[in-house]
Image (tube, rainbow, N blue to C red):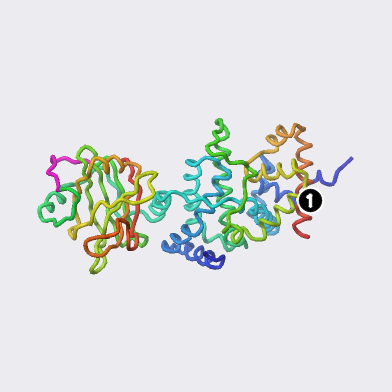
Amino acid sequence: MSDPHDIPDDDMLAAEYVLRLLEGDALRAAEQRLANDAAFRSLVHDWEAHFAGLAADAQEIAPPAKAKAQVMERVAPSTRPRRRGFSLIAALALVAALAVVLLTPVLRGPASLEPAYEAALVSETGDLVITAGFVPDENLLILSRTTGTARPGRVIELWLIADGASTPVSLGVLPDAPEARLSLTPETSAALPGGTLAVSDEPPGGSNTGAPTGDVLAAAAVIEL
Amino acid sequence: MTSPADIEQLIARTAIKDRAAFSALYDATSAKLFGVCMLVLRNRAEAEEALQEVFIRVWHKADSYAVTGHSPMTWLITVARNLSIDRLRARKAQPATLDEAFDISDTRPGPEDTAIAGSEARRINNCLQELEPDRAGAVKGAYLNGDSYQDLAERYGVPLNTMRTWLRRSLAALRECMTR
């Protein structure tokens, strides 16, 4: 009556482990062996390789751009500590000195402008850090470039990719000064939450094609504070 | 098209925290791994979250890749599948919502996929076809859908011990086929 297939050998246990069919004590025992028993570990790896063939059939599906931005932010977080407040004293002091290419003129808003949303734009190597704070009530985007500059003879252009959109929309070229305030159209304001901001390297005056022409330097999701 | 050797290099550089290499690794493999997450989770929002967890784990565990002896895509796919199954099982306490019309049998590879899938995919699929459809379905159900012995026993309307025996026989047959 005893069926040889009823008595699990190590190879069978390894397969059941990979298939996540083991439970309770059997599972704990297998996990122990995985840590201590090189031969068992090797069997597990063999079955992992076999079964991975099933998942390898999966169709390739492009994930949304913001997924990468969020991953990169989590593995290479911005060097500035995140803070809920946003000191505008320095920003306001520099507004008058700015030479900014804007979609619309800079507004003089009230003294207290707390961003409700933020995007932390950090380049892959961390040599460029730009924080964007969005104040919905004022349709205002406050940009603070805390680390790095544009490449020599080039400019940094800001783009918005709205959630679900397939193409970026230019929000303008960043000034040389580290602080800037961009006044946004209502449509852009509405598209910011849940969207992704990105900065690209462009020739002076910005891209003339309506799309980024140079390297994308950083991208980040616009997240609610 | 990034070759397996290239991907292996990117994993090695990720292990020493080379962010540019990690970014390139993401670009080269995220579509495939997102596909794996979607295959298991069948829900776009969950798959997006799972994909992020996959790459976070890759970032932290890239140094353990070499120990496994896997080909690079096998390792990445295994991480993606394991994390997705974890999520799926956590979700199974709540009723499932099939967000996409994803059938477990709807796994036709795309034109670029065969290069990545390679011989392992062909081998296991050929070997599964040697099994009776129900037996193959049980193996796939366990691997891609996180089905437990209890789930499978209920699905096929047999006692738990019978399901165990059937599955172990299927595994033995697969082993024999794949080492032919």
Predominant secondary structure, magenta span: loop
> x and y percent of residue B135 in the render?
75, 43
The residue under the point 80% across, 45% down is: A7
> x and y percent of residue A177 in the render?
17, 58
> x and y percent of residue A159 in the render?
30, 52
Task: Please name the amino acid that badge 1 sits on.
Answer: Ala
Badge 1 element: helix
Foreground residue, B128 or A1? B128
Foreground residue, A181 or A73? A181
Q: Disc 1: which chain?
A: B
The residue under the point 75% across, 43% down is: B133
Residue B167 is a magenta residue: no
The residue under the point 27% across, 46% down is: A83
Most extreme residue toward the front is A209
Where's the C terminus of chain B, which quadrant? bottom right
> x and y percent of residue A53 in the render?
65, 54
Q: Considering only vertical position in the picture, is A165 above or below A147?
A: above
Q: Considering only vertical position in the picture, is B2 above or below A74?
A: below
- Magenta residues? A105-114
Most extreme residue toward the left is A96
Residue A206 is left or right of residue B62, and the answer is left
Residue B86 is left or right of residue A81, and the answer is right
Residue B66 is left or right of residue A10, and the answer is left
